[in-house]
Image (tube, grey):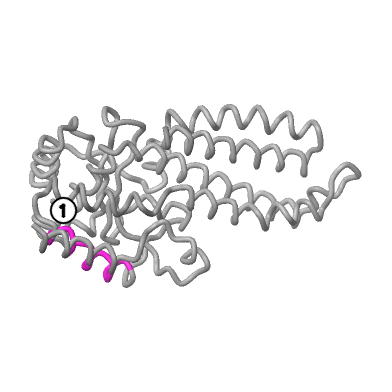
Amino acid sequence: MTNVFKTTFLLGTLTGLLLLFGQVFGGRQGMIIAFGFAIVLNFGSYWFSDKIVLAMFRAKPISESDDPELFSIVRNLATRAGLPMPRVYRIPQPTPNAFATGRNPENAVVAVTDGIRSLLTPEELSGVIAHELAHIGHRDILISSIAATLAGAIMMLANMAKWALIFGGGRDKDNNPFGALLMAILAPIAAIIIQMAVSRSREYQADQTGARIAGNPDSLASALEKLTVASKRIPMASSPATSHMFIVKPFSGRSVLGLFSTHPPVEKRIERLREMKRSG
């Protein structure tokens, strides 16, 4: 029920922002057009958010012959977790990271970057994959996928508002240029709020479940340490609005977005995993 509520909240937030955008830039007619666009985008966000997210990162599907070791790890861990074998994608980026997407376990995807394949040992990679499978098992990957899609759409609205102001949009008698300016300012803030709808507690839960699936909390703890250091050294070339998708925050975190991070402090995550190991 919680996930149903969050999905409804995210889609409803997008609809409201689109209607506001349409009213600011086109009056009543603009609202009607925006409402139609919102219906299409809501439908697409629910059914195709995984494809949209994968396209954002230029992820490519790979076969078992491309990476037999990775496929063996994913298959064995999925069997342990009692989940269907997810599709496996490669993200052509040097930043070491990974995420899962899809609307349900039957349509799930696990995506890993080139960087993570060269950085982690097989045991550490198993901890990361088990964490992502835990997200799939908890059925919170739909929320992450929709949040990434909608945050991207909101940032697009902000850019449209900015260019409209530059080129004179919103200056006719039916529109308010100050409203357009307000939209350009508030849209990125709304994207942050959408990120916050993805609970930080889900990372702790996925860490714990993933450690049990992999059978070794130390392997995930070690992976988190390596990934955090490497992500700061090689930040990912993509929008911070999608950072909640990944196992660790893929950016330096020195902007205001860091104040609203959907990831709990990695030190606390590692501490919990070490305690889990000590308590047996």
Measured as percent of width and height from the top left, residue 103 is found at 36, 32
Packing grade of label 1 (10 A; few <14, some 14-19, many >=20) is many
Residue at image coords 68%, 33%: 34
Front residue (pair 119, 78): 78
Q: Is residue 58 above or below residue 266?
A: above
Residue position marked by numbered label 1 in the rendering: 127
Q: Residue at x 17, y 37 (%)?
A: 63
Question: Residue farthest to the right?
Answer: 173
Q: Nearer the viewer, residue 195 or 6?
A: 6
**The N terminus sits in image quarter:** top left
Magenta-drawn segment: 218-231
In x, y percent, where is residue 215?
Answer: 8, 50
Which secondary structure class fits the magenta region best?
helix
Q: Secondary structure at mark 1?
A: helix
Q: Is residue 227 magenta?
A: yes
Image point 65% across, 27% down: which residue? 36
Q: Position of residue 200 (x, y in %)?
A: 39, 54
Q: Is residue 104 magenta?
A: no
Residue 264: quadrant of the picture: bottom left
Identify the amino acid type marked 1: Gly
